[in-house]
Image (tube, coloured by chain):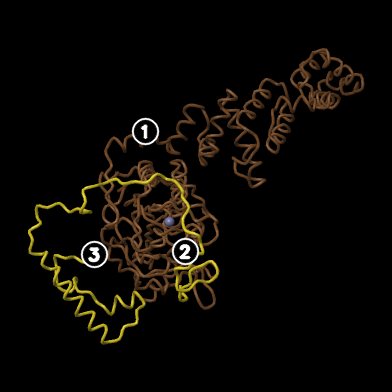
Chain colours: A yellow, B brown
Amino acid sequence: MADSKTGGAADAIDVAYVARLARLQLSTEEIETFQRQLNSIVDYFKAIREVDVDTVQPMAHAVRVQNIFRADEVRPGLDRELALANAPVHLDDQFSVPKIVE
Amino acid sequence: MNYDVTIGLEVHVQLKTRSKMFCSCSTAFGAEPNTQVCPVCLGYPGALPVMNGEAIRYTVMAGLMLGCKISAYSKFDRKNYFYPDMPKNYQISQYDMPLCLGGSVDIDVGGQAKTIRLTRIHLEEDVGKNMHFARTSGVDFNRAGVPLMEIVSEPDLTSPEEAQAYLVALKQILLYAGVSECNLEQGNLRCDVNCSLRPRGTTPLGTKAEIKNMNTFKGVFHAAHAEIRRQTELLAAGEKIRQETLRYDPDLDITVPMRSKEYAHDYRYFPEPDLLPVVLAPETIQAWADQLPELPRQRRERFVREYGLPEYDAQVLVADKVVADYFEETARQAGNPKAASNWVMTEMLRQLAAQELEIGQAKITPRALGELIRMAESQTINSNTARQVFGILFAEGGEPAQIVKERGWGQVSDSGVLEAAVDQVLAANAKSAADYRAGKKPALQFLVGQVMKVTRGKANPAMVQAMLEQKLV
Ligand SMILES: [Zn+2]
């Protein structure tokens, strides 16, 4: 994760970069709009910086519960037809996605 | 210029759980695509993961076998990335608080012993499998969510030979620990190879490149060689090494950049809010430690000490845990470890190799082999017959005594019967008898051979020889 203590550029979300990672095609206007909106959300969270947390232990979860395990037992899942029915496209027995170039 | 090679390995090991890491779907290999899936491993909104306790235990057992420090507190994180092999767009993994830290693997290359340090072992879920068609790619999510243990080594390996030795030693320990089937054909063990070069004798490590997703040890060996060649050529031409992700092309024997993973390194890890931390009490860890088997090295030393086996024999026997178990049970049944070792090392391993079988597929049980060894040792049957009986037991199973009886192969030690045969041979071979009396010692072996022939191999050769010597004084 970006180091929240250093502030500045590390906190900014580069919308154009993330869009490229996610293969999203955004127009220049969209990038500007989302950049502005996301910046304001990040700014909002910066309020947390004002809180003194030096004496507080980091916690992984808000609930004080731990060690929730399942037994190693197999149970039936979804029928393939049902699973594939949720996909926008499928090819025979597989989920279909745009061709991946290795 | 000459370069020093530095290699670090990230080995992904499929644990031998029956169900997936965070859902109850089967992990069985070879099922039809997308038949082992559910709302959790398909990433449906609102579906919640629940940890498989057995996967945690297996990972800790592996850590204990490898001398790791087991974390009292560990947690899971989301590793975010965009690639159509995970429906959630993140993989659940462990980032800063893995289950195991440190540890090491001992290797031996060309008689040179070396300790390879481990950085960590963490637990994560496997991803789906992509298949590439003419215009599209397909995704099979059967494998998505299968528990994988990632074992990360320090960059302590200095050659492809060491990398291969490390993988062999690691696999052996994991098989002993009983945490994975380690079946390479089924992709139970996959490996990323980090490789860098630096001018000989200098300290700072060079920029590393990573070869992804190798699934054979020979492949790792060849890929590392190919990558060393590539980097050496680049450096020799005055170029810089880019930190990049590569794949190995076995047909051309070269490493090539993977375009698809170019931007994939920005993982933005954050704690997985759907899972709770794992807190392991010292008593829990101790209870698991108490169930651990011996390490291969310890077992080898014990075989030498306890059974008086030569170092080499002990090493061959412990190489495969199943073979070592088989040997120990045979030794117990036969009451003779040295003879048991000889039989397993020679007849057994030879037949297995010849027929390309695993020891578990041979029909001969340790109890039957033990009995056969006792029969041979007590000279109820001679050594040739024993080998023949072994062949039958190996292929068909059964009881050695029964086989010997049915085929009339029992060794004849009845002195009356033997004497008749000896007399018959002496009468028919008067010249050889005279030769022996005249001092031609080899004539005796010829006469023993004749008696064996007359008795169709069943005579006790030691008794025959003694009898002949007595009669030819
Ligand atoms: Zn599932």
Indicate the amino acid at tag 1. Asp
Instruction: Locate residue B239, reporting x and y percent.
Output: 36, 76
Instruction: Locate residue B75, reporting x and y percent.
Output: 28, 52
In the figure, residue B425 lies in which quadrant?
top right
Q: Secondary structure beneath disc 3?
A: loop
Q: Mark 1 points at which residue?
A: B290
The verdict on a common chain for dots 3 and 1 is: no
The verdict on a common chain for dots 1 and 2 is: no
Q: In this view, does A93 lie above or below B167?
A: below
Which subunit holds the residue at mark 2? A
Instruction: Locate residue A96, reporting x and y percent.
Output: 48, 72
Which subunit holds the residue at mark 3? A
Checking the image for residue A83, the label placed there is 2
Q: Secondary structure beneath disc 2?
A: helix
Q: Residue, x 27% and y 39% (percent of image)?
A: B281
**For the residues carrying marks 1 and 2, which lies nearer the camera in this image?**
2
Number of marks: 3
Checking the image for residue A1, the label placed there is 3
Q: Residue, x 55% and y 69% (percent of image)?
A: A92
Q: Label 1 neighbourhood size at 10 Å, few (<14), some (14-19), many (20+)?
A: few
State the CA–CA distance, disc 2 to disc 3. 33 Å
